[in-house]
Image: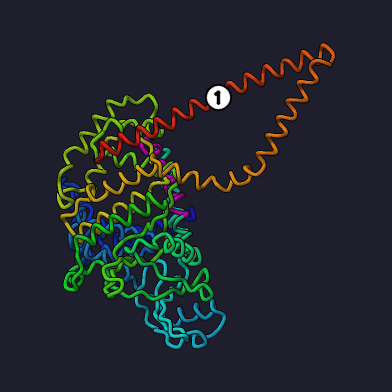
Amino acid sequence: MRNWPRLALIAWVMLRHGMDQLVLTQFSHPLLRLLARVLSIGRRLDAPRGVRLRLAFERLGPIFVKFGQVLSTRRDLMPPDIADELAKLQDRVPPFSSALARQLIEKSLGRPIEAVFSQFDADPVASASIAQVHFGVLHDGRQVAVKVLRPGVLEVIDADLGLLRAGAAWLERLSADGRRLRPREVVAEFDKYLHDELDLGREAANAAQLRRNMDGLDLLMVPEMIWDLSSAEVLVMERMFGVPISQVERLREAGVDIPKLARDGVTIFFTQVFRDGFFHADMHPGNIMVSLAPATFQRYIALDFGIVGTLDARDKEYLAQNFLAFFQRDYRRVAELHIESGWVPPTTRADELEGAIRAVCEPHFDRPLKDISLGQVLMRLFQTSRRFNVEIQPQLVLLQKTLLNVEGLGRQLDPELDLWSTAKPFLERWMNEQIGWRALAHQLRQEAPRYAQYLPALPRLLHDALKAQAAGGGAVGGADPASRELLQALLVEQRRTNRMLQAFGWIGAGFLLGVLAASVLARLSWG
């Protein structure tokens, strides 16, 4: 019952901004169109629909703003007027007062602003759903950006998450499809990441990790964190200078190679996912800039690290095999991977799932990105998954969202970009490293500290074993019959164990030779 006030507010805001008209007018049924006309009586809806939708999302708070940010990157799915308005949600949410921001910063620092900053801009340079950003200069001359958490945001998010949890529970009770989609687990995952984003100390740690991971790639820049001035509510970091990635014409005029920039974005994404298993999961245009400085020309600049995704080795291997199977149009392997992973019931017929996946994906290959709607592909795959009872994997929800963002950015930069052919060489190289000699060398390096503990003790252990065996042999002849029988049985069991160990050794050697042969064949086939 405590969710009813928030639910009533959502309904009132939607009606006030005419969202019911936006939905009902899309239907051709005469009764629905009549309902739309009746509901419009007494209301003035002069503002364009995109403006009304943006204002409704702003009024409803952080979760709705984030939903609008995701929609703004999908211009293939949204009308241009709506996409243009929703793009303003990326960094132009109405700010809170500068006096309140100053008060929050001073409370976090424990001292007046003038004691830390030689210059501080009271007006925020950007304002988003969770926080807003001010520029400043430290007394040592370093230019910094100061991020301040929006006050009262936690209470609003908790109220909306309560509604989402209640809706997810009802969906699971009322629909078999709802249970298959596991909505409560998806909401729990969303809950976790949103609360992580509300801790600016965690965001600073995420940024530091991503900065280390990207060091040496020379494609992505991450600001340095000023740890002694940061807390859970205030984050002070190096100020980055660049052009927002949405300003494509300005980048082109500056001499940026736009097609290469689009390819670099795909490389950065797949490097973070498959090499590191740690990726920036909030890659909308408001969080991405491009450097025009001579020393770092055409490098990406990443901002806002509140949401990151992580994948374990099993997830990475499964995803890489799926991607490669799709690239090679090996739909049989895709079906087998779904069955092996448990995403579909074990009784599923691989040939039927293979045929369904082929029917969805085959028409979209050998076409440039501008002619492919990933949204339509996902929708058809979802319809197919209902037939085979595919379960949604909550741990991959962030990855799916980020992949959509990457596609949206690629579409804005270079409509001719072929996402698949750009990613395929990277994934093939990654798979080679997982099954070839490089993988073996990497595993040996990881196990080296453990081996170092055992190697010095091997001579002593071998001497003790030989000494024990000699002592046991001498005792056989002089012991009583019961002891001799027991010792003989032990010796027989020891010889049997030795034979088993030898057999396992030969099996291991055969397995390594098989891996080597598979690696060579894979290189020849991919070459």
Q: Residue at x 17, y 69 (%)?
A: 252
The amino acid sitting under disc 1 is Gln
* Image vertical order of residue 134 relative to residue 453, above or below: below
Please state the horizontal and vertical placement of residue 211, each as a whole percent of the image.
42, 64
Instruction: Say if residue 155 shows up in the picture.
Output: no
Q: Secondary structure at mark 1?
A: helix
Question: What's the coloring here?
Answer: rainbow
**Quadrant of the rendered structure where residue 394 is?**
top left
Please state the horizontal and vertical placement of residue 517, each as a whole percent of the image.
35, 32
Q: Residue at x 48, y 59 (%)?
A: 195
In terms of depth relative to the viewer, which is nearer, 394 or 138? 138
Q: Which residues are magenta?
A: 175-192
Answer left or right for 494 relative to 270: right
In terms of depth relative to the viewer, which is nearer, 195 or 224? 224
Instruction: Say if residue 136 shows up in the picture.
Output: yes
Please state the horizontal and vertical placement of residue 369, each as a whole percent of the image.
18, 51
Q: Main secondary structure of the magenta part?
A: helix
Q: How crowded is the residue under tag 1: few (<14 C-alpha within 10 Å), some, or many (20+)?
A: few
Q: Residue at x 84, y 16 (%)?
A: 478
Q: Which residue is mark 1?
A: 502
Please check the rendered image and state whether residue 184 is part of the magenta-colored stretch, yes or no.
yes
In terms of depth relative to the viewer, which is nearer, 457 or 427? 457
Please state the horizontal and vertical placement of residue 110, each as a whole percent of the image.
57, 80
* Image vertical order of residue 165 relative to residue 98, above or below: above
Q: Residue at x 22, y 48 (%)?
A: 421
Please check the rendered image and state whether residue 215 is part of the magenta-colored stretch, yes or no.
no
Answer left or right for 396 relative to 109: left
